[in-house]
Image (cartoon, helix red, strand yellow):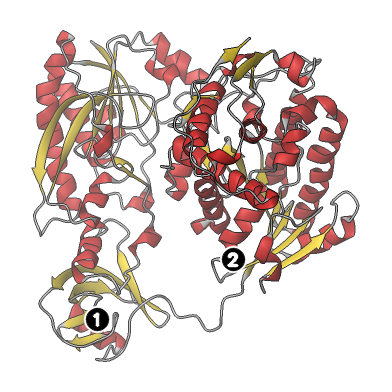
């Protein structure tokens, strides 16, 4: 059977060796370039393949059209993946008639995602294992073929556990490969209710937080012990690497977290118990026992270890938000100001959504228009650290009514801000749009690879998408040629409180859900444009804001030069289904008796509702790989929960503004009707 193998690292090499031994015809091996920063201790997949005369490749993008065609030309039948670090897209998976199989070093559905070997140790698990499964669209979610359990001993660290799992990987492949050859590999669906998804780990995650229990810190030390980057702490500004440690759960010695209780042995007080540092390294780089480390660094009882000491208070990060009164700007400002290290400067046409923010000592608001107050904008771009130009016309009816105004504001005025960021060397976080994918047919819209496809010229609705897309490309070019630090984010149908207003819905310039709520409040039929079959992925605003906050935070500069889809791919529903969910929540709401009977649904053509220049897309479902892997963000809030929160906010606002109070609740909900 002609087989292509994707593999890397110790387990990848061991698995490849077993595939070769099994007699499968390996026509090519794809791997990653061996990274010297990882210590070079692990077996080289590339070297092993070369020793057996197998062609080996290490492309940056496996699904590049060039590689798709090269793999197709190999006439492959089976794809096997062992610790290959990149997702395998549908274009590649479609080339293998005998299937695409992955080996994952955990007992799926638990510990999906990155670094499962490290994560099970961090979390103090006593058991893990290996899983062989069919590949699916989302990482590590495919049907299971086989699993083998592996016990984790208290003495295991990441390297010893890797060795155990490599051995079990060979054993499980010995069982599975004959099934693959015969085409009889079983399929057992994963239990999604038991699934956990783990994010990428970085060296910074090794910082020891002494307020945690000693056993947790001991587990962290095991999880990142040499040759991984290691756990660490600081004595003032001096960094101490901790390579081996022991939890002393029974320690009753008084001491604040991080306080040195003894220097020989070197024992540190924790939130619960104490931790003995048995081996480590100080600034000199000499590997030492705990007592020697204490002696060399003059670590004495009652001294405190912890985060790196700073000589002065860190300067607050100043964030300029243009369009701060909007749905995203107002709620992002609240999130930033929860952290003492941020100061927000904002401009907008009014401040009705800002509430108590206007009196916050670290929030500075000016009422203005970026097209008029250009000197103020340029001055504050120069003054602030991070710039978010959120000003845009972003509602469908405006694309048709005012296409030139959309271009002038969304592209031309924002381009001035982009150029100011380049001029003054500021970091730019620019809100693109999910609509840039336009008529793209990809099932999951990928930030890096999905094509951006718009409709015909006479469909004026595409001027919004095209303006955003062109500015995205200009920003990217500035980054590549002028060193602009930037991140692009694409919100996918965020919903929640303060989305917009019922007044904006009355004139047709609101989001879809607000228009639906207005229909319920006024007792008018809900209009289903083109039957409401268009599918969207609705995302809770609080979760979207948290993702955006992490992009602003930008730990280890992971977000620089990256594009982030911010949406919930699991919350896909049609506009009609959204409307039905909204009606159901409306009928159950405590304020329901304040409003007229439900007037039913009415189907209407888009050209009648929006005008001749409108065109819509049938689906818009994001890949959120970048958000998951770079900043550890995965949304969990259901659409029904978001709908209820959004509806409640609008009804509470409306009832308060109109002096409404609930009467006796209705006995039963009206049955929705649809009229063509």
Q: Secondary structure at mark 1?
A: helix
Whether residue 565 can be seen here? no
Disc ID at residue 333: none
Q: Quadrant of the N terminus?
A: top left
Task: Using the rendered view, name the quadrant where residue 19 is placed.
Answer: top left
Q: Nearer the viewer, residue 190 or 101?
A: 190
Total label count? 2
Q: Secondary structure at mark 2?
A: helix
Residue at 29% x, 22% y is 54
Q: Quadrant of the C terminus?
A: top right
Closer to viewer: mark 1 or mark 2:
2
Instruction: Determine which residue is flagged by label 2.
Output: 337
Whether residue 465 can be seen here? yes
Q: Is residue 412 left or right of residue 335?
A: right
Residue at 30% x, 74% y is 211
* Residue 333 on image: x %, y %: 63, 59
Categorize mark 2 by other alpha carbons within 10 Å: few (<14), some (14-19), many (20+): some
* Residue 601 on image: x %, y %: 59, 19
In the image, residue 215 above or below residue 57: below
Instruction: Determine which residue is flagged by label 1.
Output: 293
Residue positioned most to the right? 372
Task: Using the rendered view, name the quadrant where residue 597 is placed.
Answer: top right
Q: Nearer the viewer, residue 561 or 336?
A: 336
In the image, residue 658 above or below residue 539: below
Mark 1 and mark 2: Cα distance apart in space? 41 Å
Q: Is residue 307 left or right of residue 191?
A: right
* Residue 305 on image: x %, y %: 33, 81
Task: Using the rendered view, name the quadrant where residue 106 is placed.
Answer: top left
Q: Is residue 408 left or right of residue 396?
A: right
Q: Earlier in the sequence, mark 1 or mark 2?
A: 1
* Residue 532 on image: x %, y %: 59, 19
């Amino acid at each position: 059977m002609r087989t292509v193998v994707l593999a890397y690292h110790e387990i990848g090499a061991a698995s490849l060796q077993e595939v070769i031994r099994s007699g499968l015809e390996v026509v090519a091996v794809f791997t990653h370039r061996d990274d010297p920063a990882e210590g070079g201790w692990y077996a080289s997949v590339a070297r092993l393949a070369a020793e057996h005369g197998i062609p080996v490749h290490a492309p940056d993008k496996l699904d590049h059209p060039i590689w798709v065609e090269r793999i197709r030309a190999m006439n492959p039948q089976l794809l096997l993946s062992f610790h290959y670090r990149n997702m395998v897209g549908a274009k590649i998976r479609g080339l293998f008639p005998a299937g695409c199989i992955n080996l994952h070093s955990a007992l799926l559905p638990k510990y999906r995602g990155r670094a499962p070997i490290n994560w099970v140790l961090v979390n103090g698990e006593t058991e893990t294992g290996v899983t062989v499964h069919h590949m699916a669209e989302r990482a590590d979610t495919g049907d299971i073929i086989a699993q083998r359990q592996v016990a984790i001993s208290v003495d295991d660290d990441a390297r010893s556990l890797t060795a155990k799992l490599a051995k079990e990987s060979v054993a499980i492949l010995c069982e599975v490969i004959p099934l693959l050859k015969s085409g009889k590999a079983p399929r057992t669906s994963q239990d999604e209710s038991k699934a956990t998804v783990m994010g990428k780990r970085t060296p910074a995650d090794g910082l020891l937080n002494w307020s945690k229990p000693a056993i947790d810190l001991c587990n962290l030390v095991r999880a990142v012990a040499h040759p991984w980057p290691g756990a660490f702490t600081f004595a003032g500004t001096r960094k101490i690497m901790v390579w081996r440690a022991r939890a002393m759960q029974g320690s009753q010695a008084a001491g604040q977290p991080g306080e040195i209780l003894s220097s020989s042995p070197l024992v540190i007080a924790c939130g619960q118990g104490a931790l003995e540092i048995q081996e480590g390294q100080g600034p000199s780089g000499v590997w030492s026992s705990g007592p020697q480390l204490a002696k060399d660094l003059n670590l004495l009882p009652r001294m405190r270890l912890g985060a790196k000491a700073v000589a002065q208070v860190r300067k607050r990060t100043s964030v300029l938000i243009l369009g701060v009164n909007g749905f995203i700007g107002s709620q992002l400002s609240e999130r930033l100001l929860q952290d003492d290290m941020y100061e927000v400067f904002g401009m907008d046409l009014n401040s009705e959504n800002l509430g108590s923010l206007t009196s916050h000592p670290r929030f500075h608001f000016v009422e203005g228009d970026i097209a008029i107050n250009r000197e103020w904008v340029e001055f504050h771009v120069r003054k602030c650290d991070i710039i978010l130009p959120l000003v845009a016309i972003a509602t469908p009816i405006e694309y048709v009514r005012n296409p030139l105004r959309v271009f002038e504001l969304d592209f031309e005025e924002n381009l001035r801000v982009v150029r100011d960021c380049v001029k003054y060397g500021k970091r730019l976080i620019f809100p693109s749009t999910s609509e840039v994918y336009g008529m793209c047919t990809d099932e999951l819209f990928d930030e890096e690879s999905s094509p951006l496809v718009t409709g015909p010229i006479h469909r004026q609705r595409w001027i919004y998408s095209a303006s955003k897309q062109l500015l995205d490309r200009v920003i990217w070019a500035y980054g590549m040629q002028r060193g602009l630090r930037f991140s692009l984010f694409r919100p996918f149908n965020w919903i929640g409180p303060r989305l917009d207003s019922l007044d904006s819905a009355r004139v047709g310039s609101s989001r879809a859900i607000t228009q639906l709520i207005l229909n319920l409040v006024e007792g008018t039929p809900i209009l289903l444009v083109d039957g409401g079959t268009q599918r969207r992925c609705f995302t809770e605003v609080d979760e979207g804001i948290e993702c955006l906050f992490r992009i602003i935070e930008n730990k280890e500069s992971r977000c620089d030069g990256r594009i982030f889809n911010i949406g919930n791919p699991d919350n896909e529903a049609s506009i009609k289904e959204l409307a039905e969910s909204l009606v159901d929540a409306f009928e159950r709401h405590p304020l329901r008796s304040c409003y007229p009977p439900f007037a039913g649904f009415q189907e209407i053509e888009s050209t009648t509702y929006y005008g001749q220049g409108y065109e819509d897309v049938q689906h818009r479902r994001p890949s959120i790989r970048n958000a998951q892997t770079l900043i550890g963000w995965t949304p969990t809030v259901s659409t029904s929960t978001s709908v209820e929160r959004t509806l409640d906010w609008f009804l509470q606002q409306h009832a308060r503004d109109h002096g409404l109070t609930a009467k006796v609740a209705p006995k039963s909900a009206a049955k929705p009707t649809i009229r063509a």
